């Protein structure tokens, strides 16, 4: 493997509070996050902007060339399994714009390797890689799918779950080794439980935690990318 001088740069689009970014930083990247909402707790360089407009702008200017890899986590409400049924039953959904096709078109234009992350559901992404908290010994399941482009990897095996997610289901209480890091009530996780279960300690904002990717997921992806690229990060 060849070493790179310093740390390769990664662009974290739709970054939210930085669960994904933290994992990539642990893998060895310098991370820049972009989100349309101010994220004062984001633990890396942060740009407040519309992610698609920002990406188009830095492609046009050539600034994109400083990045080695791009991660995109566009809003999932239009296709997430946890929301799509509720949206339809209540006549919602029209307000949720599906951003993935436009994002993919821009990412392909960069010529860079990338991943697009989405939860289980109807989002139009390839499920090239599927990660689960049990693969990393976490206290959440948090299944996430990743469309992968521009690099090769050997996917880890999905392992059997040790039990149920704790909480009420149809009025019946279930114990289990995992907490539900979404919603409120019904035995859903408290903020401290979510922090511990996902390995996130830099934000205590419930909404940010419920949207976050456990850093262990992207630490694995970032390490796999560096290995596949034949790169090691110089100390």
Image: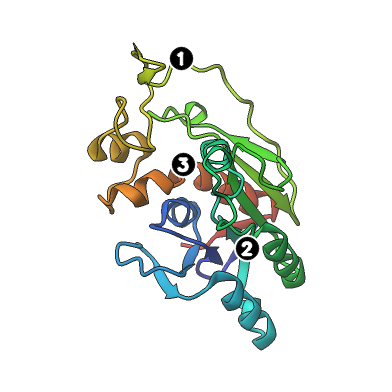
Dot 1 lies on which element? loop
For disc 3, the marked residue is 216
- Vertical placement of 7 versus 64: above or below? above
Question: Viewer-proximal residue, 166 or 132?
Answer: 166
Residue drawn at (65%, 88%), measured in percent from left and top? Answer: 61
Determine the residue located farthest toward the front in the rendered image: 91
Q: Quadrant of the N terminus?
A: bottom right
The reply, left or right, for residue 149 in relation to residue 172 is right
**Mark number, residue 127:** none
Residue 4: percent from left, percent from top = 59, 66
In the image, 192: left or right of 82? left
**x, y (%) of residue 160?**
55, 16
Q: Secondary structure at mark 3?
A: helix
Picture residue at 55% right of the left edge, 66% below the top: 11
Q: Is residue 208 above or below residue 189?
A: below
Identify which residue is drawn at 28% across, 48% down.
201
> Separation of disc 1 and disc 3 at Cα?
19 Å
Res. 66 image quadrant: bottom right
């Amino acid at each position: 493997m060849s070493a790179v001088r310093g740390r390769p740069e990664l662009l974290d689009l739709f970054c939210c509070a930085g669960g994904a970014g933290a994992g990539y930083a642990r893998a060895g990247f310098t991370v820049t996050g972009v989100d349309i909402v101010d994220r004062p707790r984001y633990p890396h360089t942060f740009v407040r902007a519309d992610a698609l407009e920002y990406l188009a702008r830095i492609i046009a200017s050539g600034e994109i060339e400083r990045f080695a890899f791009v991660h995109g986590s566009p809003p999932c409400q239009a296709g997430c399994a946890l929301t799509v049924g509720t949206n339809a039953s209540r006549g919602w959904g029209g307000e949720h714009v599906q951003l993935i096709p436009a994002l993919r078109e821009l990412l392909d234009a960069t010529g860079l390797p990338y991943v697009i992350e989405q939860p289980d559901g109807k989002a139009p992404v390839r499920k090239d890689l599927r990660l689960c908290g049990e693969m990393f010994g976490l206290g959440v399941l948090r299944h996430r799918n990743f469309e992968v482009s521009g690099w090769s990897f050997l996917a880890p095996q999905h392992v059997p779950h040790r039990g149920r997610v704790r909480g009420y289901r149809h009025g019946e209480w279930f114990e289990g080794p995992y907490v539900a890091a979404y919603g409120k009530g019904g035995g859903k996780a408290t903020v401290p439980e979510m922090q511990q279960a996902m390995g996130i300690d830099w934000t205590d904002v419930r909404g940010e935690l419920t949207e976050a990717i456990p850093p262990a997921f992207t630490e694995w992806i970032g390490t796999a990318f560096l290995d596949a690229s034949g790169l090691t990060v110089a100390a």
